[in-house]
Amino acid sequence: MNRRTHFTLLSLLFGLLTIFFNGFVSAETQNPLDQVQHTAEEYVKTIIDQPARGQLTVQAASLDSRLKLTHCAAPLEPSIPGKQSLTGNITVLVRCPTDGWQVYVPVQTQLLLPRVVAVKPLARGAVLSAADLDIRLVEARFLRGVLFDRPEQIIGSKVKRGVKIGEAIEGNDICLVCRNDAVLIKAGRSGLNVITKGTALSDGSLGEQIRVQNSKSKRIVDGVITGVGEVTVNF
């Protein structure tokens, strides 16, 4: 082994020892409060479903610097005490099983989901077009009822009550089928699908059941709204 190779091996060994030593020192000197915050955040991320198209933000509150916590020899144990909603502010209990201490950590969450919103004020009676709609990330905890994530789901529907610019459009704001509208009635049985025309006898949104009258037979049946101007009847 020549001198150059020997020097290279020594340098590599010294570098590995330095990395190991620094990592050991870092683990020993890391602030326990930081560990507690990190543990609380990571735990919340594991119990809230990550949205495929949305955005989840989790932020633990700063803890009182006067708290004197020992370095826990075992992994910290997080949990959610009591019955809490996993939206908005969550309190996480983090405990050290070996040293007997525990800390309650406030954690703020924000879950944003893509939803169809109005790009201009929508007046009652307006028929929705693509130009009226956009998709934006909206905080999930402020959303209620039936919501939509694709404009084509509601294009052609009628506004039942005014919607402000930037607001997410909810099922109660519109009727995909309105009373006295002409509708297509789809019926299926044993693999045979039948489509006929009818008249809606009440308003309804996606997934709601309404009564419709068959234009030909005058028979009144119950059906589920499956699209704009479309009702499906199952026998």
Image: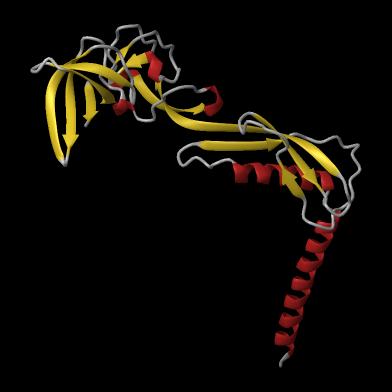
Quadrant location of the C terminus in the rendered image: top left
For this orientation, the residue located farthest to the bottom is 1
Percent x, y of residue 76? 77, 51
Residue under the point 28% across and 18% down: 210
The image quarter containing residue 191 is top left
Relative image position of residue 149 (x, y in whole percent):
39, 30
The answer to whether one can see residue 119 in this image is no
Residue found 54% across the figure and 22% down from its top: 142
Q: Residue at x 50, y 40 (%)?
A: 51
Please identify the quarter of the rendering in which residue 79 is found.
top right
Residue farthest along the top direction in this orientation:
124
Horizontal and vertical percent position of residue 173: 39, 14
Q: Nearer the viewer, residue 82 or 2?
A: 82
* Res 216 → quadrant: top left
Q: Is residue 151 left or right of residue 196?
A: right
Viewer-nearest residue: 40 or 216:
216
In the depicted structure, whether residue 64 falls above or below residue 201: below
Horizontal arrangement in the rendering, residue 67 relative to residue 124 (left or right): right
